[in-house]
């Protein structure tokens, strides 16, 4: 149901009419098949979050077409867009929980916002979702009383509260220890398979996402730099891809933001 097709997608952010446009996405084409788990990787600032926000309908693209299930997003009225968004779950990058709401109420939030379900049913759904992430017992705690890793899992339960057909996870593993990270990754894969959803995981954790993804897309400089199964991407001879997946330390992506040299800034000779 939730196949995603992106054609000739371009997106520019314009700070002010007098300022030059900043092209976050220059040319993006791909298809995400229904029910697949996809990893979307790429260096900071390459446009991953922008792409998710375009698919989620929170941004309108400068050019190109985005099709989610039967919807061409550009052709939807406000109301239909709202309905289409109900079918997508999103775990936002840095997306915090509402600090003044309990764990239970955080997960119930999308249900209250998008449905008129009776309270008893909301309770059952929330407890089911919390059970899926292993936190049914934590329902009455406040966000301030749970660990960062638990908070990510509550956010995950909230992202799947409405039984979405497509779930987009923006950095779901940020700040997790290796064990919680592995658990969260497996959970995403299990939810994908058990609920038959299409999942998209944006992450800088190459190893972990390669383990759970059917397909990998690497964005660089606003374009798709590589696409394929994890094994295909690992076997790539492209220097940028090799550097990015951690095969080579050195490569075309510079670690330092362009600026004066160390010698210029500190007035010293540096041994290299
Ligand atoms: N609201 C905005 N206004 C102007 N420019 C923006 C805005 N949001 C993002 N950008 C710019 O667009 C580019 C892509 O940003 P985006 O957040 O999509 O990157 P990203 O791949 O998600 O990076 P990260 O891995 O650091 O989260 C960056 O150069 C960023 O500075
Ligand atoms: Mg981002």
Image (spheres, rainbow, N blue to C red):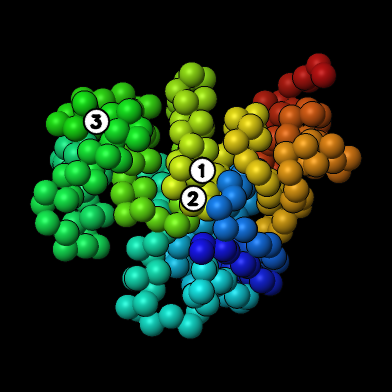
Along the viewing direction, whichever of 253 and 174 lies nearer the viewer: 174
Vertical side of 101 occupied by 9: above or below: below
- Residue with the mark numbered 1: 193
Residue tagged 2: 196
The answer for how far apart the CA atoms under marks 3 and 2 are is 22 Å
* Label pair 1/2, CB-CB below 8 angstroms: yes
Alpha carbons under labels 1 and 2: distance apart = 5 Å
Looking at the rendered image, the disc whose residue lies closer to the viewer, 3 or 1, is: 1
Image position of 53 (left or right of 48): left
Q: Which residue is drawn at 74% across and 44% down?
A: 229
Screen quadrant of the C terminus: top right
Looking at the picture, tell me which residue is in the foreground, 138 or 33. 33
Q: Residues within 10 Å of mark 2 (few under 14, many from 20)?
A: some
Sequence-wise, which precedes: disc 3 or disc 1? 3
Q: Position of residue 105 (x, y in %)?
A: 18, 43
Instruction: Name the residue carrying label 3.
Output: 136
Secondary structure found at label 1: helix
Instruction: Look at the numbered disc 2 and give the secondary structure of its residue.
Output: loop
Which residue is painted at 47% across and 26% down in the image? 183
- Residue 232 in picture, x, y percent from top left: 80, 41
**Height in image: 232 above or below 186?**
below
Identify which residue, 101 or 83, lies in the foreground. Answer: 83
């Amino acid at each position: 149901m939730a196949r995603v097709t992106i054609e000739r997608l371009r997106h520019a952010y314009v700070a002010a009419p007098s300022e030059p446009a900043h092209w976050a996405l220059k040319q993006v084409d791909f298809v995400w098949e229904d029910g697949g788990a996809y990893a979307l990787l790429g260096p900071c600032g390459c446009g991953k979050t922008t792409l998710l926000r375009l698919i989620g309908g929170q941004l309108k693209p400068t050019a190109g077409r985005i099709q989610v299930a039967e919807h061409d997003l550009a052709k939807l009225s406000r109301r239909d867009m709202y309905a289409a968004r109900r079918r997508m779950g999103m775990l936002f990058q840095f997306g915090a929980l509402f600090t003044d709401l309990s764990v239970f109420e955080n997960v119930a939030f999308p249900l209250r916002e998008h449905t008129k379900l009776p309270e008893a049913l909301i309770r059952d759904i929330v407890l089911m979702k919390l059970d899926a992430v292993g936190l049914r017992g934590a329902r009455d705690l406040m966000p301030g009383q749970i660990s960062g890793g638990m908070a990510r899992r509550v956010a995950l339960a909230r992202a799947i509260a409405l039984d979405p057909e497509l779930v987009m996870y923006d950095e779901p593993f940020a700040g997790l220890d290796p064990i919680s990270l592995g658990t969260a990754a497996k959970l995403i894969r299990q939810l994908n398979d058990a609920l038959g959803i299409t999942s998209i995981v944006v992450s800088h954790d190459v190893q972990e996402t390669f383990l759970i993804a059917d397909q990998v897309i690497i964005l660089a400089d606003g374009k798709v730099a590589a696409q394929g199964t994890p094994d295909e991407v690992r076997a790539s001879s492209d220097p940028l891809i090799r550097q990015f997946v951690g095969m080579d330390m050195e490569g075309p992506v510079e670690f330092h933001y362009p600026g004066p040299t160390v010698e210029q800034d500190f007035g010293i000779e540096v041994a290299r």
